[in-house]
Image (tube, helix red, strand yellow):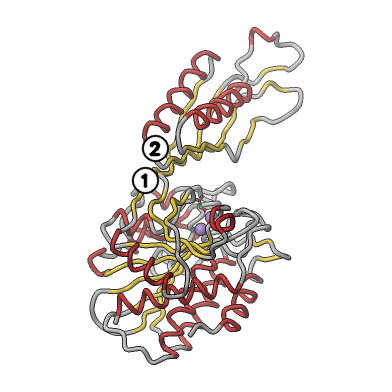
Amino acid sequence: MIDRERLERRMTELARIGGQDTAVSRLGLSADEQRARDLVGAWLSKRGAHVRRDAAANLFARFGGEGKVILVGSHLDSVPEGGRFDGALGVLCAIEAVESLVDAHVRLRRPVEVVAWADEEGARFGVGLFGSAAMFGRLASSIGDRRDRDGVSIAEALRALGERGDPAAARRDPAELAAYLELHIEQGPRLERAGLPLGVVSDIVGIYHARVTIRGRADHAGATVMTARADALAAASEIVLAVERIARARPDSVGTVGEIAVRPGAKNVVPGESLFSLDLRAARDHDGLVREVLTSVTTIAGSRGVEASVDELARVPVTSLDPKIREVLRHATRSVGVDAPELVSGAGHDAQNPALSGVPTGMIFVRSTGGSHTPREFASVDDAALGAQALANAIRELAS
Ligand code: GLV
Ligand code: MN
Ligand code: MN
């Protein structure tokens, strides 16, 4: 049985790390993320798990002995000024699910490992799904050199956390795993609208992340006539609107420019350079969406006499989750009295990396309100406890 009070107490305790009121800023590969790992690691080692960290700062806590592993977890980092539930709830419910099986002296035929992935959001270095990509060998080889805004590289950030600075060393053979399970808040309104506490994820959208640099020409804002300018921000603005237009016109597609910077950045200087992010997602024809946006970047830059360069950070294809694990999860949710609908996830998840590496993978969604990636994000303890119970039932079915 799930210990609802224990789950609630831990939700509150974890939310204090990097938290203020209902907001949490616990960036990936930061000291706060490390404190969160230390906290959950201590809970798990007290329950007899073998706890270790890998070269990408992922935390693993293993219960049981030999054989293929059931891996279950989520991430502990957040976006800046995010909420208390995105990622954290999946780690807390994985811990609670496994502890409930330990409490009940359930004999597990397979080892079960709880994982807390490092830096899922990629808020600081721009590389999302970092820890899980490292474990499944899906990181670009030069990734350790990528720097944050202060010039600190990923390798340096890992060294500051006590690692060697070589995330590729986190790689593990996917054949070691029998299954990967992740519980996560839905981050959208579908379960709330349906009046249902739980869902089962069928597919996760394809995601493309890039940083675009537009190089125009800085000039005097008073002395440069409008026809003689190469305004980098005006070009970037036209691209932002093109992203919106293209994504609106395509089925099941979204496109966002969430960060933008201008250099030199003064009211009386025509912008010489502009840097912005691209986040392009689609449940179908993701490649077509990316192609159309990149073509428009080139066309708009050409027509405005500026240069555009695109630094691709990540491209994760549309990911279908395993039909057999989905059935196990549907059965597990039915066993807690919920007829869980299958949902496509518009958010990216660490589950994509095991799924794309051939590991049978499934996800449970817990109803959430108030959106996500904001302090308004919310899931009730009752729904979380129900999700944790369904997760425990699924682990039991897969591991015993
Ligand atoms: C992660 O939350 C993402 O989908 O960006
Ligand atoms: Mn998120
Ligand atoms: Mn998340």
Q: Nearer the viewer, residue 237 or 328?
A: 328
Label 2 close to label 1 by CB (< 8 Å): yes
Query: Mark 2 = which residue?
Result: 286
Quick one: label 1, few (<14), some, or many (20+) residues within 10 Å?
many
Identified by mark 1, the residue type is Val
Q: Earlier in the sequence, mark 2 or mark 1?
A: 2
Q: Is residue 67 left or right of residue 350?
A: left
Res 351 label:
none
* Residue 95 place in picture, x, y as percent: 47, 77
Q: Nearer the viewer, residue 318 or 44?
A: 318
- Residue 329, compared with residue 312, is above or below; it is below
* Residue 119 place in picture, x, y as percent: 49, 59
Q: Residue at x 32, y 77 (%)?
A: 397
Element type where label 1 sits in the image: loop
Identified by mark 2, the residue type is His
* Residue 130 place in picture, x, y as percent: 43, 56
* Residue 349 place in picture, x, y as percent: 44, 56
Mark 1 lies within 8 Å of ligand 1 (Cβ measured): no
Element type where label 2 sits in the image: helix
Query: Mark 1 = which residue?
Result: 318
